[in-house]
Amino acid sequence: EVQLLESGGGLVQPGGSLRLSCAASGFTFSSYALSWVRQAPGKGLEWVSTFSADGVSTYYADSVKGRFTISRDNSKNTLYLQMNSLSADDTAVYYCAKAVVGGTLHAFDMWGQGTMVTVSS
Amino acid sequence: QSALTQPPSASGSPGQSVTISCTGTSSDVGGYNYVSWYQQHPGKVPKLMIYEVSKRPSGVPDRFSGSKSGNTASLTVSGLQAEDEADYYCSSYGGNKNLVFGGGTKLTVL
């Protein structure tokens, strides 16, 4: 069974940092692009970042560029998101999502349950 | 990275068809056949319903179909059922190595 399990969310003060993890199972992790998508409370979906399947390319939304860093460890089947300089606008559920076969930046066929990040003093 | 434009709400009676639009620009929706649609029930995880404009993942009923004309993509749900009531989001490759989502449409089955 294909599964994505996020962890690392929590309450952090403005200006603080947090590292999210996404443990994958049930598929060949290294063969797929993986992304982070977030959803603020009561709001819509927002793409955050993607790491290509070839392990070379990373992509970021303008809203997080320079503050967030995506990485992956194929030996541990785990995707990460290092989040720095957090603000209240970053408060959201963060989903880990797997790209469709051959895709990078267009469709996600598997999503994790999400981890909540709350930025507040 | 402007969000794609979706109507905030749509509705239809059981058995009817409803179409949800998703309008972008020639730099995203109109420029690539990389439009996707997601269904999200309250408190649940998004589910891929359509990708690459009109392809359905395995397990998605053929009542769901997608199309595109110019800068506007559409999701049509035929034979509406109660369980189709959910939020629907479109997305598109944005051209400049990014992905954009629509604001979402709340579909109500009357």
Image: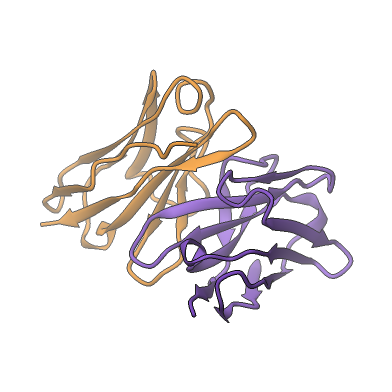
Residue B31 x, y percent position in the rendering: 51, 21
- The purple one among the chains is A
Q: Is residue A34 above or below residue A113?
A: above
A74 left or right of A1 in image? right
Residue A73 x, y percent position in the rendering: 84, 63
Q: Is residue B35 above or below residue A74?
A: above
Residue A68 x, y percent position in the rendering: 68, 57
Pick whichever, A99 or B8, lies toward us: B8
Residue at image point 46% right, 32% down? B53
| Quadrant of the rendered image containing residue A104 | top right
| Quadrant of the rendered image containing residue B25 | top left
A112 left or right of A27 in image? left
**How is this picture coloured?**
by chain
Residue at image point 38% right, 55% down? A44
Number of numbered callouts drawn: 0
Residue at image point 22% right, 47% down? B79
Pick whichever, B97 or B105, lies toward us: B97
Task: Name the image quarter holding the N terminus of chain A.
Answer: bottom right
The answer to whether residue A112 of the structure is visible from this angle is yes
Q: Is residue A7 above or below residue A22?
A: below
Residue lying furthest right in this view?
Answer: A75
Pick whichever, A66 or A94, lies toward us: A66
Residue A39 x, y percent position in the rendering: 45, 61
Residue at image point 24% right, 41% down? B7
The answer to whether residue A28 of the structure is visible from this angle is no
Q: Colour of chain B?
A: orange
Q: Is residue B71 above or below residue A12?
A: above
B73 left or right of A49 in image? left
